[in-house]
Amino acid sequence: MPEIRNYTLNFGPQHPSAHGVLRLVLEMDGEVIERADPHIGLLHRATEKLAESKPFNQSIGYMDRLDYMSMMCNEHGYVRAIEKLLGVEAPERAQ
């Protein structure tokens, strides 16, 4: 039987299941992942700089473009943060 040896596998960012937003350096023992080193920040699009020059309500559209797989999550988080900073309580129907 051949000996199984440890190896390092680069996963992403151009892997079909990574969607271009994630890179992992995986240390493998056969088919078992022993260690994973995530590399984040591959989706930087200067959104903060773009939002600096716009009113807060015009920046909501930029949040959709952060990650096409979870656009509503990004938009929801941004709007909730603005509501909290302004002390605005959304009506029950809008919640």
Image (cartoon, rainbow, N blue to C red):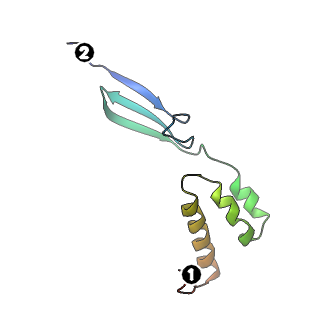
Looking at the rendered structure, the secondary structure element under dot 2 is loop
Residue drawn at point x = 74 percent, y = 68 percent: 58
75 vs 16, nearest the viewer: 16
With 93 as the anchor, is 30 left or right in this view? Answer: left
Q: Cα distance, mark 1 to mark 2?
A: 61 Å
User: Mark 1 packing: few (<14 Cα in 10 Å), some, or many (20+)?
Assistant: few
Residue furthest out toward the top: 1
Against 6, residue 82 (above or below) is below
With 38 as the anchor, is 88 left or right in this view? Answer: right
Residue 3 circle label: 2
Q: Amino acid at mark 2?
A: Glu
73 vs 93, nearest the viewer: 93
Residue drawn at point x = 68 percent, y = 66 percent: 60
Residue 94 circle label: 1
Looking at the rendered structure, the secondary structure element under dot 1 is loop
With 81 as the anchor, is 36 left or right in this view? Answer: left
Q: Amino acid at mark 1?
A: Ala
Residue drawn at point x = 69 percent, y = 62 percent: 61
Residue drawn at point x = 78 percent, y = 66 percent: 54
In the rendered image, residue 70, in percent from the top left (x then y), is placed at 54, 56
Numbered disc in front, either 1 or 2: 1
Against 26, residue 71 (above or below) is below
In the rendered image, residue 67, in percent from the top left (x then y), is placed at 59, 52
Quadrant of the image for the N terminus? Answer: top left
In the rendered image, residue 72, in percent from the top left (x then y), is placed at 56, 63
